[in-house]
């Protein structure tokens, strides 16, 4: 079958400001198995070029595929764009079968199919095997009811088949890297880059995160297999930067160490960046030198909040002392730390923002990223806040960089000014500037300058968007009403 994979354009500030893009790993992950099954597969990365909807629809029509598959890593905020694309495609080419997937469609399949009949199928959960089964079913004109892990309409009634089994061996499904042809994906300062994944899932039950629910259980790839694949990408595609998409790659310290050692043996000049739990950094203190030798330059650490009562409430399973120690250990091994801090888990007052700033100054991370609590319906956190009022009803802006939940004690303009003030203080404090200018490693100085340049543009852009572009809703819309 002739299949077109479409990565829709995303409105997130972070996607546009760096003028750099990473390849859509999710689409490539289903592309490889589809190619190996004998299908003709192409990638249309509309996010890379920031194509307008009309141009995307025109290109889909010109490609004349049997089916078009759409998905985006930011599935909540991308869903309205996907719905518009599929609606217009069906209007001009009703014979094209439209299929979507991702975290948001997996949990909102019923509402989507009831409201968007132009979407033919939704893949629920991991897509590699499900999409193979579905395309084979369609090609043979069999009953879709036999395919596990999908939702669709039958005679006007929305139905969902039984859940597909969790993939046991991630190495069984090849990533279609060849689909990147024609795209110059870069990151970390215009260096050729890709997204990779050592593991899927997370064993921690943080209430605001749905990863443990979506992936079902934590699994990892063969350490040697991934190391070999990265070597191939470095040699054949010139990839210098590998951005790890894992929620928690080091959950199994033995497997993680084996992976680091497999990379070190290859002696590649590469840059690795990713996310990790602070307590795992503390746990791995005795072999953090392997992290550095393998090529890691920065880790994102989910600090989330200064108040241990709040951390306990959201089941973060972290402590202030371990967060601080992790940053110290990373600095000791010349690995940058980026602390993410989430606004909105409690009913903040001015003193809470002051305490947050004090805590962040005490942590002393190399970089920070302030985000907003975003209550997705499939998370336990949603149940805690479903009766709260939301101020942002434009789903396209539900990207963790816009305030969604109303605050009882502060107006939205108070919140964004406090957030921007914390950011500017943290990034212009003397310690941060000293590292930016005089860090002993040239590569890390370059990385910090790159991030600072982007952060400066984003800082002003977010203020401009808030005060002059993004409409807020003050009609007291309840969260549970918004997600019916």
Image: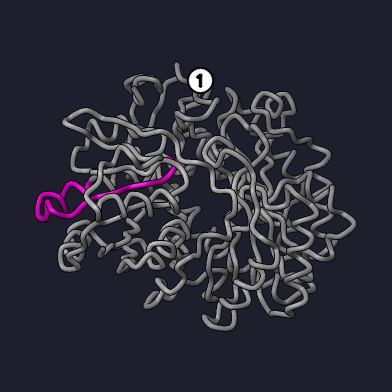
Stretch of the chain drawn in magenta:
84-103
Q: Quadrant of residue 381?
A: top right
Was residue 388 drawn as part of the magenta stretch in this picture?
no
Residue under the image location 72 percent in, 46 percent down: 277
Residue under the image location 32 percent in, 45 percent down: 469
The percent coordinates of residue 219 (x first, y second) are 64, 48
Query: How is the model colour-coded?
Result: one colour
The percent coordinates of residue 341 (x first, y second) are 63, 41
Quarter of the image with the C terminus in it = top left
Residue 159 to residue 400: above or below? above
Residue situated furthest left in the rendering: 92
The percent coordinates of residue 365 (x first, y second) are 73, 52
Q: Is residue 384 visible?
A: yes
Residue 357 to residue 258: above or below? above
Q: Nearer the viewer, residue 197 or 1?
A: 1
User: Mark 1 falls on what kind of element?
Assistant: helix
Quarter of the image with the N terminus in it = bottom left
According to the picture, the residue beneath numbered tag 1 turns out to be 383
Residue situated furthest top in the rendering: 387
Was residue 93 drawn as part of the magenta stretch in this picture?
yes
Residue under the image location 22 percent in, 37 percent down: 116
Residue under the image location 60 percent in, 44 percent down: 201
Q: Nearer the viewer, residue 275 or 415?
A: 275
Q: Quadrant of residue 113?
A: top left
Does residue 93 appear left or right of residue 36 in this picture? left
Q: Is residue 467 visible?
A: no
Does residue 399 appear left or right of residue 198 in this picture? left
């Amino acid at each position: 079958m002739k299949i077109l994979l479409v990565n829709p354009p995303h409105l997130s500030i972070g996607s546009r400001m760096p003028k750099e893009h990473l390849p859509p790993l999710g689409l490539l992950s289903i592309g490889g198995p589809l190619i190996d099954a004998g299908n003709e597969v192409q990638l249309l990365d509309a996010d890379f070029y920031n194509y307008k909807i009309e141009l995307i629809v025109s290109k889909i029509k010109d490609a004349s595929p049997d089916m078009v598959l759409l998905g985006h890593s930011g599935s909540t905020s991308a869903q309205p764009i996907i719905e518009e694309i599929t609606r217009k495609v069906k209007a001009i080419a009703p014979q094209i079968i439209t299929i979507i997937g991702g975290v948001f469609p997996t949990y909102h399949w019923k509402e989507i199919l009831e409201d968007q009949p132009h979407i033919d199928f939704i893949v629920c959960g991991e897509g590699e095997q499900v999409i193979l089964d579905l395309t084979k079913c369609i090609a043979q004109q069999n009953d879709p009811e036999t395919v596990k892990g999908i939702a669709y309409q039958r005679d006007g009634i929305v139905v969902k088949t039984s859940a597909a089994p969790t993939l046991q061996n991630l190495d069984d499904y090849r990533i279609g890297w060849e689909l990147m042809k024609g795209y110059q994906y870069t990151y970390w300062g215009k260096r050729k880059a890709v997204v990779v994944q050592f593991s899927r899932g997370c064993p921690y039950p943080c209430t605001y995160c749905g990863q443990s629910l979506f992936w079902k259980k934590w699994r990892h790839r063969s350490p040697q297999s991934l190391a070999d694949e990265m070597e191939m990408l470095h040699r054949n595609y010139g990839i210098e930067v590998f951005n790890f998409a894992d929620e928690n790659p080091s959950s199994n310290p033995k497997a993680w160490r084996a992976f680091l050692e497999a990379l070190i043996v290859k002696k590649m000049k590469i840059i690795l960046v990713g996310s990790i739990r602070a307590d795992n950094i503390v746990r791995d203190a005795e072999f953090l030198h392997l992290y550095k030798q393998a090529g890691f330059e920065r880790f994102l650490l989910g600090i989330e909040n200064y108040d241990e009562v709040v951390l306990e409430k959201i089941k973060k399973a972290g402590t202030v002392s371990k967060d601080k120690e992790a940053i110290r250990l990373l600095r000791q091994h010349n690995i940058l730390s980026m602390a993410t801090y989430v606004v909105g888990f409690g009913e903040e007052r001015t003193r809470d923002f002051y305490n947050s700033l004090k805590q962040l100054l005490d942590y002393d991370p190399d970089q920070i990223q302030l985000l907003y609590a975003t209550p997705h319906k499939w998370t336990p956190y949603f149940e805690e806040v479903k009766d709260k009022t939301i101020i942002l009803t434009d789903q396209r802006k539900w990207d963790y960089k816009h305030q969604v939940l109303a605050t009882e004690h502060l107006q939205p303009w108070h919140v964004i000014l406090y957030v921007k003030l914390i950011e500017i203080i943290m990034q212009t404090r003397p310690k941060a500037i000293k590292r930016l200018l005089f860090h002993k490693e040239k590569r890390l100085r370059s990385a910090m300058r790159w991030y600072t340049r982007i952060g400066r543009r984003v800082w002003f852009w977010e203020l401009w968007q808030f005060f002059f572009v993004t409409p807020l809703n003050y009609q007291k819309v309840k969260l549970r009403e918004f997600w019916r």
